[in-house]
Amino acid sequence: MEVGGVGNGMAFMAVPDLGHGVIPGGAESPGKGSSRGVPKLREILRNSRKDSETPGDSTDGEFEYGDSDCYTQELSELYSYTEAPEFALNRMCLEEEIKTFGKEVRWLQLDQNSQMLCILKLLNGLEVTNRDCRLRVTRAILYLSQGVFGECDTESDVMKLVRQNVFMLLKAGTFSALVDLLSMEIDNSQALSSALRKPAISLADSTELRVLLNIMNMIVETMRQECEDDPKDWTLMREAFRKELGSPVYNNEPFAVLLFTMVTKFCSGHAPHFPMKKVLLLLWKVVLFSAGGFEDLQEAKVCQRQELGLLPMPEDSIRVTRGLRASSPPASAADLIDQQQQRRARRPKRAPPIEYISCSQGLAKQDSLDAFNETDPYKSDDIHDDEDYGDENDSGIDGEVDLLERDEIMPPVSSAMGEKLVFPKGLPWAPKVREKDIENFLEMSRSKFIGYQLGGDTDTIVGLPRPIHESVKILKQHKYVSVSEVQIKDEEELLKMPLSKNEEQVEQTPAEALYQGMLPNLPQYMIALLKILLAAAPTSKAKTDSINILADVLPEEMPITVLQSMKLGVDVNRHKEIIVKAISALLLLLLKHFKLNHIYQFEYISQHLVFANCIPLILKFFNQNIMSYIAAKNSIADLDFPHFVVHDLPDLTAESLEAGDDNQFCWRNLFSCINLLRILNKLTKWKHSRTMMLVVFKSAPILKRALKVKQAVMQLYILKLLKVQTKYLGRQWRKSNMKTMSAIYQKVRHRLNDDWAYGNDIDARPWDFQAEECALRAGVERFNRRRYESGSRALEFSAVDTCAQSVLGRTSDLPEEFNVTYERWLEREVFSDPICWEELLQQ
């Protein structure tokens, strides 16, 4: 196998005309004591780096993968461009309410007490029965949460007032009042029947719901942002609100369950007017805020390992992932053919190899130059001519290129001038070994050398050769016991010893409360989310029976001019991208939180995602021009909040809409792609049956095309997916994709005795796939029944009366049907069958 893009039989050859001289120092090459050659060499290295990494070639410098985008961008994605006229309407509603104070004043002219009195008066207006009056009051509250932009001059002033007003609204109890209104609107049969009668649902059918969800989104997203200079009461208020969202205080269920109910109602066709984008954004942010993001999960995992007495994790996965560098994007087959033809046309005659080259002040070995030249990852095409020409038979014609950043594992190379050119070395991840791997290794060694087995024993190594002792020692040094393994072991002990084993104490974490609320309808929730994801995917074709996810973006009057049509087209595409972003982030958060809370909760939601065809759906999503999707410019910066409400709107033209923004990539689309890849990894990890689904659906070429995106985090999860199915793809695929295999070797964590590059895995038997899923499902059902079915444990282990007199002496109420048909039953079942008592006694 190639490691670092250099074969095992690597030979260093002299290049006589490097840099128009003997060494890259110019015509007068310096001698041993000169240092003029080193700066020149570094200059060539820098120039080669600049040539190979053109601007926009990599997104590592600009894109930082995290829980969400920046605060301003998240708020701007809440509003569709078709909602722009409603900003002025919200402003007018608040100004009318302020006039009731007796004089015309501005919001900023009121002192804090007067502002709070105004908010309390608005909350009283939410209880009126007139829908129009209630809607005007709700719009006024929305204008407050939007930062009273009519009295601001800059965007920073708007964002500052957004935070101040949101904390005032929350202090007055606005969120609880909004939840009550939202529940009432969900059950509003009048709005539902009106929407069902219409042939086409538009923005006007969801006005009340959109205004309510906008306020709640502004509150949750603002409370999620924490600043260092926040007052102490704001910090306490934020923590109290976070606990409230994660607790079952809304109708004995967490608030997220109410939003899940809206999703299922929408997908079932019972509420087609629900604004799904706003619902999904709010659902994602509620889970993110109440349960915690990626860094919170990492800290919770560290604490949980300490409580269980496990060794600390070998590294911080978030820090390692952020420190990764992207690999070179693959070239297409046509590009490689053109490059080879051009190099053959301009190839000079090969000069005979030279061992030593004369210098002005002595002799310098050419080996060091050749070593640097061979290992330089930024070497230009002209210098690579001989190497590329000699690598013609390397099956690179299928689009395979060197995906490995060779300098990350390269040892220091000595230059001709005596200085060491130090390259970063080492693999990013510490290797891991499971207890099962050590057990399998010892069982195989015992069978081979001694001829006996000790099931489950990983300590006895008597009689085994010395190298086996050393191997076991190395494996145990890197043994990693996960929290999931401890949880599975505890669950097995509870099932084996239900009476002697004490009942576990379940901590009411936000994830536990959410799982309890979702459990009765969790399959329906997963199916609904995947239905919406399918409808929002760019590869999906429009169907007449599919759900309409554009109800909250289409205006009442369809566009007339070309410019209006282009603007609506951008808005629709942006709308779909935001939905994909919200669903992918929500599913990933649920999987990660449930896995940390209990492994069987994770397996339950994973199985229902797999049963709902989540794996082929994600592969279908990536079966497109992923570069075009990530570089999509479906946004109009002049119409984004808060820019739109502060600055005058310039004249939009068709050319400006086509040009889009100046970003080289779309943050939300790249974020969605990474989330979907991580979901696919979690569904297939250590599951051979699901890995075979990746093989059956031909995911390898789809994933390989996605490697063109030069982003380190995305490439990491693609290579992980390729690694788990490598042993099933056949020898010819591995032979034709050796450079991808090298990239896997460098980027992905090592399992010391994992034969991922070969097809001899003893656990990969096809006949075990169905049994594996059935056993897992049985374990999950036992877990849910034991922990969440009330009284099941007491009934299962209650005392059984085995005394015949006691049982026969009980009076039982028999149904009337039995009394009527009793004689007929007795004749058919008892008297008509002869009984041979002698044979019965003999048996």
Image (spheres, rainbow, N blue to C red):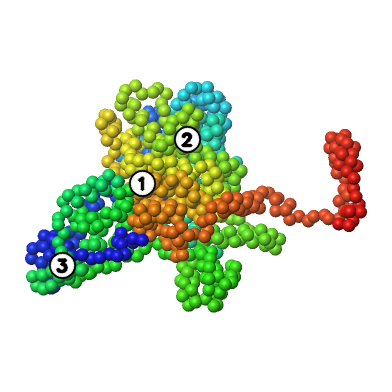
* Residue that carries the numbered disc 2 in the rendered image: 276
Position above or below: 332 against 45: above
Marks 2 & 3, CB-CB < 8 Å contact: no
Instruction: From the image, tell me which residue sits under label 1.
Output: 705
- Name the residue that disc number 3 marks: 354
Identity of the residue drawn at 15% across and 70% down: 356
Residue 432, relative to residue 133: is it above or below?
Answer: below
Q: Amino acid at mark 1?
A: Arg
Q: Position of residue 41 (x, y in %)?
A: 17, 62
Q: Amino acid at mark 2?
A: Met
Callout 1–callout 2 Cβ contact below 8 Å: no
Q: Tell me the quarter of the image containing the N terminus.
A: bottom left
Residue at 83% across, 55% down: 802
Residue 651 x %, y %: 26, 29
* Along the line of sight, the residue nearer the viewer: 741 or 647: 741
Which of the two discs, 1 and 2, labels the residue nearer the N terminus?
2
Q: Residue at x 53, y 25 (%)?
A: 196
Task: Determine the image quadrant of residue 376.
Answer: bottom left
